[in-house]
Image: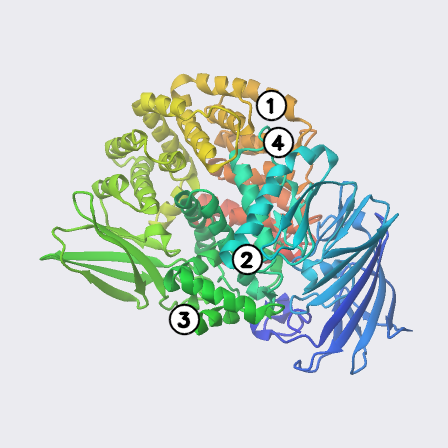
Amino acid sequence: MADTTPETGPDAAAGTIYLADYTPPGWLIDKVELTFRLAPMATRVLSRIAFRPNPVAPEQPFFLHGEDLKLISAKIDGAEIAPDVTEKGLTCVVPARAFIFEAEVEIAPEGNTLLEGLYMSGDMYCTQCEAEGFRRITYYPDRPDVMAPFRVRIEGDAPVLLSNGNPAGEGPGWAEWDDPWPKPSYLFALVAGDLKAHSASFTTASGRDVALNVWVREADLGKCAFAMDSLIASMRWDEEVYGREYDLDIFNIVAVGDFNSGAMENKGLNIFNSKLVLASPETATDSDFEQVESVIAHEYFHNWTGNRITCRDWFQLSLKEGLTVFRDQCFTSDLRSAAVKRIEDAQIMRSMQFREDAGPLAHPVRPESFVEINNFYTRTVYEKGAEVIQMLHRLVGPEAYRKALDLYFERHDGEAATVEDWLRVFEDTTGRDLGQFKRWYRQAGTPRLKVSERYENGTYSLTLRQETPPTLGQPDKLPLHMPVAVGLLSPNGDEALPTQVLELTEAEQTFTFDGLGARPIPSILRGFSAPVIVERKSTAAEEAFLLAHDTDPFNRWEAGQALARRLLTDMIHDDAPSAHVYLGALGQVLAEPGLDPAFRALLLGLPGEDDLAAAEAAAGRKADPARIRAAREALKGQIAAMHGRALQRVYEENQVDGPYAPDAGQAGRRKLASAALALLTRQDGGAAARAQFAAADNMTLSIGALSALLSIGEGAAELATFEERWSDDALVMDMWFSMQVTHSAPEKAAETVERLTEHPAFTPKNPNRLRSVVGALAGNPAGFHAADGSGYRLLADWIIRMDKTNPQISARLSTAFQTWRRYGEARQKLIQAELARVAEAEGLSRDLGEMVGRMRGAA
Ligand code: B3K
Ligand code: ZN
């Protein structure tokens, strides 16, 4: 079995697992019965598993994964056996027919600091099994292509005892659950604690009633309504848009305070980081609300894309994640503003995924090897994976897409599928050959799209040339099948050619358009139709023209960004910067009242510090984070000085009267007002922000005011008031911590982190708190990259420290170093020295070892 015997394969010594080594499991499972006798330091897990030989598998030893388990006893068909046990699992001789395997093991959830397997968050038991955590609960073929129905009995003192599936009986101190749908072990879940439910019910399209519960600590019951509404909206949407109904009698969501990631789609029992469930106007911002809505949807949508149809192996992770992200993106576009959502998703791709593609951690949407799968829950697998599906959707059109999805569900329900299966349903329903398209799954790196054009006698020709730079292990790239949405504008601002999708398949292709009265201005890659970087020689005048006239919201926004980037680059290099074109264009945007406020807020935003650093690197220069910070600050000052009155008007006009609602309309107005406030603060010394803070009756206004103050070095009194008011609310305090780090002056950033780690409310054991203090440092690029190396040193110290208790967290923190090649020699040396120090740390985890190895390997 590819993922069980790391001693095979070409790179055996390093423990690398290869897609090419995949072998079907030797045994399949008809039924799993588990009994849990809960105790913090000595939980007993009794398993009874009905195995049968897999007729299509090659011969192999019988092996069950198991890590950190104390084996009490094991039996086959009722007879005690003495298996060979290693730190990876258990091997034994089994009959060549169906048989029952039983085991009793002991585990210690209270001592589990990995937050993987069965662990405790406060006095509550909970689980996280994806990707390979189930093997920390009992001996099992812990791989996604072994699917089985589970029956679970929980014995414990807690008032609430939950597992997957439907309730199947309960009494004092016990409860039983039955999940009829075959599932892989990574979807197993158990929760036991003193929880209260916010309940509702849902009637499916075919008329079945489903009980819905959001389980939380009693004190949080008032913060569940929005998550519940989001769940109901998601269930409805999946019925309407994909024809998918829910398939159990009950759907439970549990909020957990200590959680490594955002949430987990366990069958019928989703477990959530409390940050992504709990929301009230007083404690959560508009963007928190929107995140809750989209993550609730994401996990719910996994019920079909992930659970009913799962992944054959972990290399296929994007099969469920890319598709489910695409689905949650469409859900948010339908509920809120499609234009704004598209721009925000493109922003994430360009700042977070492009950096992955451009650095030492580059990997394809479907990786071909890994050491630790937890390191591959990345922007590439998730977001680029979603972009690949967005392109497919664009290429085949919405109707053919739906037909292909219907076939996917019909053909693969109950199966563990592959990317090949996924593409085949599109080929079979549309008759298209997707052989070349499949390269998007195999080739890492961000393609460059070079655009050149000609205009002669009414004919305009557009030459598109694609080129993907080499990435580690993939020196030569082949041309991709790429949808390039293009429109043409007449010099008077009218649309000369509405959006057309050009299909680029060759390295270079020319497209011609006849009958044009004048040389048009092209609008290329409308809607961010492919995850690529467009390279085209343009002028500030052209960008200002597109910002004023483009009918495509994404390209309109992009024109403004290009204009700002051009100006900021000149400012960074003291290269005779001339701000009047940008400032003039911005003035027009401010004065255009018909525009959706959320969209206007995006137009007002400058490219981020990291994006500017990436742009410097792409232009072959070394990024200087301090100069980037200074240029952005200076430009903000100029905008405020020039447009103070307009900003004041925008701020006033976008105040929201009446009761708070987290809907797109209100949130957009608050976002625009907040963007205006942040700039106004540079003119009024913070007076308006102070007033807003004092009067705020919701968290969006409080945080907006507080960050505006912190960004000009003010706000000490407000920070103290805020701390006093919210010291009992962990999620709000996380914001209090992180804001101070991200807004800290660059030379003080490391010091600020250090000071906050000494705060009595700081604890590294809680991943949210650790991320909000130590993790937040990377959100302050000028501070993290301080020339004296203080940011690097501090982060490396924490990475080493956290690796001993929670390697998933340390490996994740280490990704802040992946952009090291963007910076000058002095910073590169400092980073390399810290990475070397991390690499030599005693007892380095597999997770962190792989990450640091990849980042150093590229040196
Ligand atoms: N599938 C989980 C992620 C699990 C993370 C494992 N390290 C959440 C999600 O993508 O929906
Ligand atoms: Zn997911």
Coloured how?
rainbow
Amino acid beneath label 4? Val
Q: Amino acid at mark 1?
A: Phe
Residue at mark 2: 321
Q: Which residue is mark 4?
A: 732
* Quadrant hosting residue 277: top right
**Does the beta carbon at disc 2 come under 8 Å from ligand 2?**
yes
Tell me if label 4 and label 2 are in contact, CB under 8 Å.
no
Residue density around tag 2, few if under 14, some if 14–19, many if 20 or more, within 10 Å: many
Q: Given contact means CB atoms under 8 Å apart, are the residues at marks 4 and 3 in contact?
A: no
- Mark 3: which secondary structure? helix
**Front disc: 3 or 2:** 3
Labels 3 and 1 touching (C-beta < 8 A): no
Figure quarter occupied by ligand 2: bottom right
Asked if one can make out residue 659 in the rendered structure from this viewpoint, the answer is yes
Residue at 69%, 56% (x, y): give it. 129
Considering only vertical position in the picture, is 595 above or below 657? below
Q: Please, is residue 75 above or below residue 276 in the view?
A: below
Residues 598 and 181: in front is: 181
Earlier along the polypeptide chain: callout 4 or callout 2? 2
Of tags 3 and 1, the one toward the viewer is: 3
Give the mark toward the camera: 4 or 3: 3
Of mark 3 and mark 2, the one earlier in the sequence is: 2
Marks 4 and 3, how far apart in space? Answer: 50 Å
Q: Distance of mark 3 from mark 1, alpha carbons?
A: 57 Å
Residue 841: % across, % down: 66, 51
For discs 1 and 2, the disc positioned in front in the rendered view: 2
Which circle marks residue 430 in the picture? 3
749 above or below 9? above
Mark 4 → mark 2, Cα distance in angstroms = 29 Å
Q: Disc 1 marks which residue?
A: 722
